[in-house]
Image (spheres, rainbow, N blue to C red):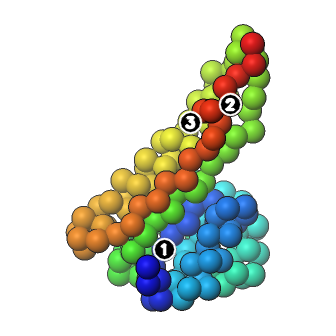
C-alpha cells in the first residue's frame, strides 16, 4: 500500500497503539493528524512525531464535526481514518456493574468510533475512495468475574 502523500486521521494518537500507528504512517510519507482529549499531551506528541494535532473528544459531536470541517477545508480530502480512541479502565464483578461507567466506555469505544466513521464515510463516498480502520478491544473475550 503506497502511503506517500496520503492523508490520515488517527484517533487516540497521543499514546500507545495510536501513537505507534501515526509514527508508522508518517515514516511511510503520509500526512497524519492525531486526535485526543488531552490537548497538552496531544501537542507534545504531535511535535515529537511530526503529526498535526487536533484536540477532539470522539464523544462530542460538535468537536467531531469541527474536526472534519477542518480536514475538508484545509486538506481538501481524506484518504483514511484509523479509529483507535478507546478506554477500558473499568472492571467489576458482574453483580457490582455500574451502568453509568459502562455507558461512559460505550460512548468512547462504540459510539465515538461510529461518529468518526460516519463523518469520514461522507468524505470517502464523495471522493469514491478511502480507508476506514476500526481498532477493537479484546475485552469481550475476557468477560466479568462472578
Disc 1/disc 3 C-alpha distance (Å): 24 Å
Q: Which residue is painted at 45% across and 55% down in the image?
A: 116
Asked if labels 2 and 3 touch by Cβ distance under 8 angstroms, the answer is no
Residue 65 appears in view: no
Q: Which residue is mark 2?
A: 142
Q: Position of residue 35 (x, y in %)?
A: 60, 65
Query: Could you say whether the residue bearing mark 3 is in a helix, strand or loop?
Result: helix
Instruction: Locate the C terminus by quadrant.
Output: top right
**In which quarter of the view is residue 96 placed?**
top right
In front: label 3 or label 2:
2
Residue 8 marker: 1
Q: Is residue 76 left or right of residue 133?
A: left
Q: Is 92 drawn above or below residue 137 in the view shown?
A: above
Q: Which residue is painted at 48% across and 74% down in the image?
A: 8
Residue 114 marker: none
Disc 3/disc 2 C-alpha distance (Å): 16 Å
Q: Is residue 119 left or right of residue 8?
A: left
Q: Which residue is painted at 51% across and 84% down in the image?
A: 30
Query: Could you say whether the residue bearing mark 2 is in a helix, strand or loop?
Result: helix
Q: Which residue is mark 3?
A: 106
Asked if labels 1 and 2 touch by Cβ distance under 8 angstroms, the answer is no
Q: Position of residue 106 (x, y in %)?
A: 56, 36
Q: Which residue is painted at 39% across and 74% down in the image?
A: 78
Amino acid at each position: 500500500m503506497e502511503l506517500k502523500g496520503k492523508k490520515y486521521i488517527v484517533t487516540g494518537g497521543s499514546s500507545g497503539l495510536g501513537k505507534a500507528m501515526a509514527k508508522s504512517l508518517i515514516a511511510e510519507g503520509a500526512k497524519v493528524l492525531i486526535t485526543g482529549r488531552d490537548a497538552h499531551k496531544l501537542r507534545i506528541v504531535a511535535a515529537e512525531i511530526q503529526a498535526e494535532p487536533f484536540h477532539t473528544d470522539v464523544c462530542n459531536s460538535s468537536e467531531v464535526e469541527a474536526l472534519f470541517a477542518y480536514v475538508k477545508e484545509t486538506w481538501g480530502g481524506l484518504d483514511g481514518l484509523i479509529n483507535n480512541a478507546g478506554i477500558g479502565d473499568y472492571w467489576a464483578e458482574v453483580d457490582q456493574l455500574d451502568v453509568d461507567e459502562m455507558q461512559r466506555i460505550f460512548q468512547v469505544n462504540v459510539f465515538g468510533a461510529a461518529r468518526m466513521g460516519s463523518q469520514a464515510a461522507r468524505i470517502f463516498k464523495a471522493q469514491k475512495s478511502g480507508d476506514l480502520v476500526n481498532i477493537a478491544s479484546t475485552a469481550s473475550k475476557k468477560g466479568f468475574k462472578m
